[in-house]
Image (cartoon, helix red, strand yellow):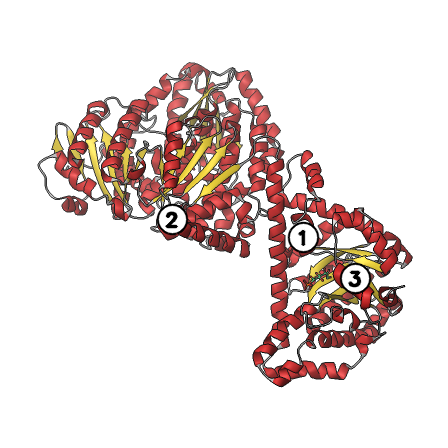
């Protein structure tokens, strides 16, 4: 016999406040049940954190879970915890049976993340109850404002509840009321109340810790005499309340129906102050119909030298009441203390849970079968690193990853952001219906097409283009061409590359109203109708659009072979893993199922349960956001291994359109020719995407040198091109996180519409007058002309040469102030032009040290154009337009593609001017010699 055995005879059940796999499997729980009269056990997030997070006892279990396929971090946690809980429940079951459900319980706590959400608490409790599936489980629900209604509802469903984090007697009365109300509900519904059990867990020692501190602060003899008395006095008062409740008529009625009393359970009973006896919170709290849950060390201490006084809890109640009342004399408000302790209790459990999930996240990564996400990172400056870590910690404390996944708009600007988060879960949705895409692929294959032509802009074209370029044409499948231009030469070149009679056309537009895909649809419909006839041309067309759009209507009228619908809650640039990316992927013969399964690995890694420091998307986004917000390193320079380099065009849109607004944002610098390390200014942040085994030596050396020079470099190691889907997801998360750090709405594009409206006005005008309004050049020479608006033109002054103007314009870009230079070319986007324009970029970067961008119009208007107009006013723009040697008519309109392109250039220019941007337009008589002349003039200007 030992002192613990005597407690049982005093009407108090001893439970153990501890759990660990080896503790149950190794037989210690059973041994303590026999030796120490242990009647139950409790667990909490801190206990699991210690068990799982700080030992390797669970490695085999974790491996076993992951060997059945990749799981999310919380799925892994649950699998491990539930197994432990079930095992403990099974060991304790004989006590439960013997005591007719009074004892023999094991407790499992709801996630602390839902402690302030009634609905979520109820759902979680129900889920745990069902998952554990043992009658001797108690689900732990906190005694928070949100927890209280959940208690009643759960009891009413016959679920055993342990109400935890209880500090205040007032709150206890509400807990007891919730219990009785729940039983009454159950009775009314015809349920069996005798099967339900509940304990109300009063936290003891923490009250003394908190109150003693305040009493010390009072520096008064009387105050000091109260030290170490509050917790026990509070428990005594609670016990008196309990006794009066069970003596009342309301309880009698329930007891007569077979209900079990809700016992008070003393928790937090290890002594925290070494000056107090190590068994104080056991000896003083002995009472009938109570439970004391003790950590192993307190249990052992009590067995060793505990003193058992029956009904100790009932002694000296008036003194206890007087002690509590006296607290006010020394400025201590017990209500405030208990309220603060409840909040702190939730926070501490959340901290433990964060740690636990972080440990699991780390181990999961090591166990992912196949290509896994990898991310190395260096802010490369102590100060920036500190900021980054502080921000990550803020994200953890504020639960921002969960807020993001829950669609909390206040994370961004508090506008309609919650309506634009469909992409977070699209991978699952698409996986569920992936067979539709597989059937579609089979249908495409049967058609025997040699080419697929995608007509779309920005979010509707860039991801398919990245996939086409990254994976290349698939043998036996159509080659995908993307046409996102109104440039007549480019349309002609694209058409030349196709076998028009064996082409499947994909018209892709979320809104359905975008000008470019609509007029290109008209054009290619006519072309295909020429050989197939108007009636059958539609068979070679499919559309991807949102339900109810004008494109859907047009597609139906034209007899399209299929219409696929996008998700209304996914904006264009976040649509890569939705139908907008997957339909073209299927058409070009890619394994969409594999792409999605692979992307899901990243989705889990970036999930709501992945703490910020272990979350590859959040880390990247926080790093970029911090560097931009506090260090003005807003030129996010993308350097990617050539075999994976196509992603840069998609990333540009994602970064720029999502963040470039209200004068803030990221300016993506993509495909910039590499320069010597000292040519890069303090306004840069580098994202280096390395394809494992295919790294480019020059890039690698530069990136290393940039790191040594103190630039922040995020290095994303892509193990395989097949991981493209993962990177889509990671960068989407990173972008919205960066947007949150900057405080912008990451889902709108307020300045894109302005160019479109200007263009619309110009084309409508053209329809009537058959001409675009005249413009007076600032200067012209050899068929090359310069245009600007009055104000900026005046700023440039009057010059006799092109060089003179360019010198003044280029001098605007002050690298030290973080200005960048952008070439916006309305030309055919072909290799020769890209090369020539990149040479120009390299020259400007080399001489001015300003970061440089290149965009082709109108393509960039649906991408980086948002940041150029709405982002920081640090851009200096040179728009390049060119006389079209050959134009193409747009069926059914007076305007041609050449006119549309010219109107788009003008419309965008005007929108830039309206926003006070520094912009100059140079009009070339022809691209080839014009670009060479321009290079010469820029070189002379910068000499
Ligand atoms: O299950 C319960 C209460 O029902 C316990 O596990 C309870 O959470 C613990 O006793 C406390 O968290 C321990 O508190 P403390 O000793 O760290 O102050
Ligand atoms: O990025 C989006 C583009 O502006 C195209 O929009 P859309 O898909 O509605 O045609």
Q: Residue at (58%, 36%) from the top-left corner? A: 600
Q: Give the labeled residue for mark 3.
A: 300
Secondary structure under tag 1 reads helix
Label 2 near label 3: C-beta < 8 Å? Answer: no
Point out residue 207 in the picture as x, y percentages from the top left corner.
Answer: 66, 71
Is residue 236 toward the left or the right of residue 858 in the image? Answer: right
Q: Which of marks 2 and 1 is in front?
A: 1
- Give the Cα distance between marks 3 and 2: 55 Å
Is residue 363 toward the left or the right of residue 539 in the image? Answer: right
Q: In which quarter of the image is ligand 1?
A: bottom right
- Give the Cα distance between marks 2 and 1: 38 Å
Q: Could you tell which of marks 1 and 3 lies nearer the N-terminus?
A: 1
Secondary structure under tag 2 reads helix
Is residue 578 toward the left or the right of residue 303 in the image? Answer: left
Along the viewing direction, whichever of 249 and 821 lies nearer the viewer: 821
Point out residue 178 in the picture as x, y percentages from the top left corner.
Answer: 73, 66
Q: Give the labeled residue for mark 2.
A: 628
Q: Which label is found at residue 340?
A: none
Neighbor class of circle 2 (other Cα within 10 Å; few <14, some 14-19, many 20+) is many
Q: Give the labeled residue for mark 1.
A: 50
Point out residue 815 in the picture as x, y percentages from the top left corner.
Answer: 26, 44
Q: Nearer the viewer, mark 3 or mark 2?
A: 3
Where residue 318 sits, quadrant-wise, is bottom right
Point out residue 325 in the picture as x, y percentages from the top left corner.
Answer: 67, 83
**Quarter containing the N terminus:** bottom right
């Amino acid at each position: 016999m030992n002192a613990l055995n005597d407690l049982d005879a005093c009407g108090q059940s001893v439970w153990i406040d501890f759990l660990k796999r080896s503790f149950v499997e190794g037989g210690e729980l059973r041994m303590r049940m026999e030796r120490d009269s242990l009647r139950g056990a409790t667990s909490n997030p801190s206990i699991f954190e210690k068990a799982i997070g700080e030992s390797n006892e669970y490695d085999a279990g974790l491996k076993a879970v992951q060997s059945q396929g990749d799981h999310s971090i919380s799925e892994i946690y649950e699998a491990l915890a539930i197994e432990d809980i079930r095992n403990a429940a099974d060991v304790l079951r004989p006590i439960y049976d013997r005591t007719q459900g009074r004892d023999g319980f094991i407790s499992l706590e709801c996630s602390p993340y839902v402690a302030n959400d009634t609905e979520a608490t109820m759902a979680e409790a129900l889920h745990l109850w069902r998952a554990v599936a043992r009658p001797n489980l108690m689900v732990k629900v906190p005694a928070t404002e949100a927890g209280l209604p959940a208690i009643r509802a759960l009891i009413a469903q016959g679920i055993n509840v342990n109400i935890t984090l209880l500090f205040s007697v007032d709150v206890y009365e509400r807990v007891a009321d919730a219990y009785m109300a729940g039983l009454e509900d159950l009775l009314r519904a015809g349920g069996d109340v005798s099967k339900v059990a509940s304990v109300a867990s009063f936290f003891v020692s923490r009250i003394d810790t908190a109150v003693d501190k305040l009493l010390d602060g009072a520096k008064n003899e009387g105050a000091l005499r109260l030290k170490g008395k509050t917790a026990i006095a509070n428990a005594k008062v609670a016990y008196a309340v309990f006794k009066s409740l069970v003596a009342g008529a309301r309880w009698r009625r329930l007891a007569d129906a077979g209900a079990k009393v809700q016992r008070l359970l003393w928790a937090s009973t290890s002594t925290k102050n070494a000056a107090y006896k190590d068994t104080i919170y056991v000896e003083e709290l002995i009472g009938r119909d109570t439970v004391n849950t003790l950590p192993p060390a307190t249990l052992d201490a009590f067995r060793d030298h505990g003193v058992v006084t029956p009904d100790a809890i009932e002694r000296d109640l008036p003194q206890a009441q007087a002690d509590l009342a006296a607290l006010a004399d020394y400025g201590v408000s017990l209500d405030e203390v208990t309220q603060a302790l409840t909040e702190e209790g939730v926070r501490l459990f959340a901290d433990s849970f964060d740690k636990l999930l972080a440990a699991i996240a780390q181990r999961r990564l090591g166990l992912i079968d196949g290509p896994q996400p990898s991310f190395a990172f260096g802010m490369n400056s102590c100060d920036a690193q500190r900021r980054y870590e502080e921000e990550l910690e803020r994200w953890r404390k504020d639960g921002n990853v969960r807020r993001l996944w829950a669609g909390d708009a206040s994370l961004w600007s508090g506008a309609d952001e919650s309506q634009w988060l469909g992409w977070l879960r699209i991978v699952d949705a698409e996986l569920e219906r992936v067979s539709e895409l597989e059937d579609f692929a089979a249908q495409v294959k049967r058609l025997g097409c040699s080419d697929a032509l995608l007509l779309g802009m920005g979010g509707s074209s860039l991801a398919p283009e990245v996939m086409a370029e990254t994976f290349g044409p698939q043998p036996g499948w159509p080659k995908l061409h993307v046409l996102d231009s109104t440039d007549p030469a480019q349309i002609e070149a694209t058409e030349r590359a196709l076998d028009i009679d064996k082409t499947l056309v994909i018209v892709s537009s979320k809104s359905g109203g975008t000008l470019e895909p609509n007029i290109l649809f008209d054009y290619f419909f006519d072309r295909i109708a020429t050989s197939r006839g108007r009636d059958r041309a539609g068979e070679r067309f499919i559309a991807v659009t949102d339900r109810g759009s004008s494109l859907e209507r047009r597609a139906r009228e034209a007899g399209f072979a299929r219409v696929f619908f996008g998700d209304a809650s996914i904006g264009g640039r976040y649509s890569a893993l939705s139908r907008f990316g997957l339909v073209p992927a299927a058409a070009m013969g890619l394994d969409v199922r594999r792409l999605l399964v692979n992307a899901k690995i990243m989705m889990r890694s970036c999930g709501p349960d992945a703490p910020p420091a272990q979350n590859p998307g959040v880390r990247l986004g926080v790093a970029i956001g911090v560097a931009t917000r506090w260090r003005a390193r807003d030129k996010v320079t993308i350097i990617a291994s050539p075999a994976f380099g196509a992603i840069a065009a998609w990333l540009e849109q994602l970064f720029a359109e999502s963040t470039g607004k209200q004068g803030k944002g990221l300016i993506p610098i993509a495909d910039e020719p590499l320069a010597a390390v000292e040519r890069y200014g303090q306004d840069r942040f580098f994202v280096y995407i390395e394809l494992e085994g295919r790294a480019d030596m020059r890039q690698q050396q530069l990136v290393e040198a940039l790191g040594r020079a103190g630039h922040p470099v995020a290095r994303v190691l892509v193990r395989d091109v097949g991981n493209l889907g993962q990177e889509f997801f990671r960068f989407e998360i990173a972008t919205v996180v960066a947007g949150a750090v900057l405080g912008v709405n990451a889902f709108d594009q307020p300045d894109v519409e302005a160019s479109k409206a200007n263009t619309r006005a110009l084309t409508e005008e053209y329809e009537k007058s058959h001409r675009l309004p005249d413009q007076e050049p600032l200067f012209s020479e050899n068929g090359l002309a310069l245009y600007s608006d009055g104000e900026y033109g005046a700023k440039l002054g009057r010059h006799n040469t092109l060089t003179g103007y360019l010198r003044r314009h280029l001098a605007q870009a002050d690298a030290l102030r973080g200005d960048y230079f952008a070439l916006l070319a309305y030309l055919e986007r072909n290799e020769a032009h890209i090369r020539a324009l990149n040479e120009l970029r390299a020259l400007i970067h080399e001489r001015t040290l300003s970061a440089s961008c290149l965009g082709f119009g109108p393509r960039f208007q649906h991408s980086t154009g948002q940041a150029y107009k709405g982002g920081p006013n640090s851009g200096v723009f040179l728009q390049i337009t060119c006389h079209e040697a050959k134009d193409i008519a747009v069926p059914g309109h007076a305007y041609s593609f050449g006119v549309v392109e010219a109107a788009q250039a003008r419309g965008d220019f005007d929108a830039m001017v309206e926003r006070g941007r520094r912009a100059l337009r140079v009009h070339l008589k022809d691209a080839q010699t014009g670009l060479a002349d321009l290079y010469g003039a820029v070189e002379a200007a910068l000499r």
